[in-house]
Image: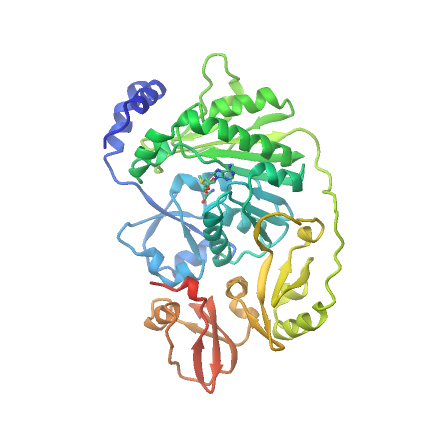
Amino acid sequence: MKLPEKYVQEIKALLGEEYGEYEKCLEGRSACGLRVNNAKISTEEFLKLTPFSMSPVPWVENGFYYNEEDALTKHPHYHAGLYYIQEPSAMIPASRLPVEHGDKVLDLCAAPGGKATELAAKLGGTGLLVANDISNSRAKGLLKNLEMAGHRNILVTSEAPKQLLNYFPEYFDKILVDAPCSGEGMFRRDPSMIKSYEEKGPEIYAPLQQEILSAAIKMLKPGGMLLYSTCTFSTLENEKNIQKVLDDNPEMEIADIRKGDGFSDGIAEPGMDERLSRCLRIWPHRAGGEGHFAALLLKAGSAGTSKSNRSREGSSSQGKAEASFLAFAEDIPWLREHDGKIDVRDENLYLIPGPLCDISIRGLRFLRTGLLLGTQKKGRFEPSQALAMCLRQEEYPNCVSLAGDSIEARKYLKGETVQLPGMYSGWVLVCADGYPLGWAKGMQGALKNKYYPGWRMQ
Ligand SMILES: C[S@@+](CC[C@H](N)C(=O)[O-])C[C@H]1O[C@@H](n2cnc3c(N)ncnc32)[C@H](O)[C@@H]1O
């Protein structure tokens, strides 16, 4: 691999005599990783269920290495949202941000959702995750990944950080800034990054990262925590940005971050704050991952409750639509006991998470508020794909479960008609090994495929 000369000099200066090991390591293959979605399945259960062999990623309990030749994105368990394909060192940021149930969490640069899906899993259906990406097209992929993973307490937005700040000053308990960066840690996995590095290197990204960080700090509650991460090695984009945060914001402190075998400390060059060593670095020749940087920051003060600026009243057309939905959702406990409200917009019904009922988002560019439950057509409720992904088999009695490795499960995911013995009527939840894939409509014994066309398996 031909690395840019400027980059080679930079890394030699950081690694000294270790540089040879780093260079040699780039000739090898990068590791493939997946993260189990504990919002749907425990790690233990997943390991019993999966037909693939895998070995643990040492720094996260739900992370695993798998063999490159295994087609993990083609398996129905992937489409059931049981795991997310993720580069192993990219599993660190969400795992090191101490999200607690009930928190209001912001993932400011979230697409395509590798970290947002884990942050939402840590919330366990409580609190709120605002997942944002400035790119609208990338935010669409983010929404799909959050929905496939079965998350409902979400607000998916596509805004510049400065604009979000107008809506959420000092609002969040926890914030992740997984910043756009020069991607030096991705050269082996994606050699096209070398070209983009040559066009836009650390000098271009560092000011953008500072701008994003500055808005993020203003959105963090006193007492809140912010994790800043990149997949690059340049100190300009990493420690020097954190140094600037410390210089400009006396209320910000670097917190200790849990490290492990093969992790390195942050680099405090002469004249820089020694606390920068608390940051974390992953180098590909020292640990089984491509490379990452993470800094955990704490804002001084104690967290109060966020201000509410909106009432929870629903619209008058709501009563009828809500009633038809509730008849459908009779046995789903979390739909009867949620802390939010059901909102009706046009034909669509949404379950708005509690914290989102208390704020105004008028004028904000969003792709989703809460969970799209379904649509109300000619007085009848049609459940959404996203609702199917949030359900557990035991919460909805009218189910059919296909074997995960069956031809039928794959046919269903391709949008084809599946012939099954038995008589079905109404909305049937189709599962693979007991984990929902989507809907079918029982019609005179046959099952009409209602899998969301945009998600079909190719
Ligand atoms: C490193 S990627 C994020 C990866 C993501 N966190 C994940 O784990 O899947 C950085 C993201 O930042 C977005 N981005 C670029 N400039 C931004 C800005 N000014 N504000 C917010 N997001 C930005 C990019 O569109 C890109 O999706």
Q: Where is residue 99 in the image (x, y as percent from the top left)?
A: 58, 43
Given residues 434 and 150, the one toward you in this image is 150
Q: In this view, does 195 lie to the left or right of 131?
A: left
The residue sitting at 61% across, 30% down in the picture is 298
Most extreme residue toward the bottom is 444
Given residues 254 and 263, the one toward you in this image is 254
Would residue 353 be visible to someone looking at this image? yes
Would residue 287 be visible to someone looking at this image? no
Quadrant occupied by the N terminus: top left
Corner quadrant of residue 50:
bottom left
Number of numbered tags placed on the structure image: 0
Q: Position of residue 319 (x, y in %)?
A: 72, 70
Most extreme residue toward the front is 363
**202 versus 193 height, above or below:** above
Q: Where is residue 182 in the image (x, y as percent from the top left)?
A: 39, 32
Most extreme residue toward the top is 271
**120 versus 51 height, above or below:** above
Given residues 134 and 37, the one toward you in this image is 134
**450 versus 261 height, above or below:** below
Q: Position of residue 13 (x, y in %)?
A: 34, 18
The residue sitting at 42% across, 62% down in the picture is 455
Corner quadrant of residue 232:
top left
Corner quadrant of residue 373:
bottom right
Given residues 87 and 277, the one toward you in this image is 87
Q: Is residue 353 left or right of residue 419?
A: right
Q: Is residue 102 left or right of residue 55?
A: right
Quadrant occupied by the C terminus: bottom left
Colour mode? rainbow
